[in-house]
Amino acid sequence: MEELRKDPTRGRWVLIRPKGHDAANDDCPYCPGAESATIEIAAYRKDGAPPNGPGWSVRVVPASDPYFRIEWELIREGVGMFDMITPRGASELVLESPRHDDTLATMAPEQIESVLWMWRDRLLDLKRDGQIRDILVSRHHKKPGVAWHHPYSRLTAIPIVFDETRQELREAREYYQYKRRCLYCDMLRQEIGAQGRVVRLTPGFAALVPYAARSPLETWLLPRRHGCSFEDALTADTAADLARLMSQYFRTLAAVFGDPGYELVLHTAPNLRSRILQGDWATIRDDYHWHIEVLAQPERINRVGGIFVNEKPPETTANDLRTSWQTA
Ligand SMILES: [Zn+2]
Ligand SMILES: [Zn+2]
């Protein structure tokens, strides 16, 4: 029986989940021609071809062995002094391209733009469900030598707020309570002024290496216009601008930095419809600022206790990225 259990000594949630069986399958279940193996949640098709067949450019399917399921009942339970919630939610895969060997470095910017629109579609749809509190959009790229899988990003919708999101929201709110300004807008203003950690500026976005980067090559893509949620901020202009920036960034990583593995996470506001207490997220529209974080070479992350050790100064990384930037 799957359960979300809260560790009261850390305030941290853990998913307890007996191991399921992974279907060992050599044929990719996500390539065109195999559509009948999965049930389509959403898709973009040019010619109006019917669902669950080929002809798609981006397609969303349920994860094959999901951590969170929409059909489960949401139960909150006290177990003596402990807290438990059933893992009701959703685990979806956004198949980013029909081409099995595509990556964000090989896809055309227009294809990446379609993926951004699909993230938005799925976030808006899942957020209509008031029992879903938070949705993580993430993407893993494997380091060289690790077996390839069909390119997809993952949406994980859960009935609690992810611990990392909660901490980030708390910091942003506290900064705002103290200064009446958005932490990220302040950071953008300072970084763009100083320039040392800015990798690339577009009309709508800044790519920068954060001041306290956890690992070499960590990069954040921040919208220059304030807004707490990605799905509200995406317009024809911002989507095209962001897709082009992402395409150039991942092409640079692939061409100059040895195509390292990475984790991409979209940081966007939780589901504001799922407010439980009156004061929840009272100032979030002003205090939080959506963005994308890319943590490259996660396998090279060093930690001592909880402290990350980064052996490459962020200013050096920013300079390396800037001077080798692939604009094509
Ligand atoms: Zn495939
Ligand atoms: Zn802001």
Image (cartoon, helix red, strand yellow):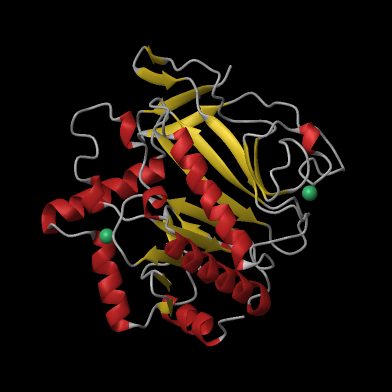
Indicate the quadrant where residue 326 lies.
bottom right
Apparent side of residue 18 relative to residue 196 in the rendered image (left or right): right
Name the residue nearer the viewer: 203 or 64: 203
Query: Which residue ends up furthest to the right in the rendered image?
Result: 26
Query: Which residue ends up furthest to the bottom in the rendered image?
Result: 323
The quadrant of the rendered image in which ligand 2 is seen is: bottom left
Residue 217's spot in the image, x, y percent? 52, 71
Apparent side of residue 270 relative to residue 115 in the rendered image (left or right): left
Apparent side of residue 310 relative to residue 180 in the rendered image (left or right): right
Name the residue nearer the viewer: 41 or 163: 41
Which quarter of the figure is the N terminus placed in? Answer: top right
Residue 116's spot in the image, x, y percent? 53, 54
What residue is at 52 percent from the left and 80 percent from the top? 321
How many labels, in total? 0
Placement of 13 over or under 242, stated as above or below: above
What residue is at 76 percent from the left and 57 percent from the top? 146
Name the residue nearer the viewer: 244 or 263: 244
Which quarter of the figure is the C terminus placed in? Answer: bottom right
Query: Which residue ends up furthest to the front in the rendered image?
Result: 47
Placement of 25 over or under 168, stated as above or below: above
Kindly tell me whether residue 216 is visible in this rendering: no
What residue is at 49 percent from the left and 83 percent from the top? 322
What residue is at 70 percent from the left and 26 percent from the top? 20
Residue 37's spot in the image, x, y percent? 79, 33
Indicate the quadrant where residue 53 lies.
top right
Kindly tell me whether residue 165 is visible in this rendering: yes
Residue 292's spot in the image, x, y percent? 45, 58
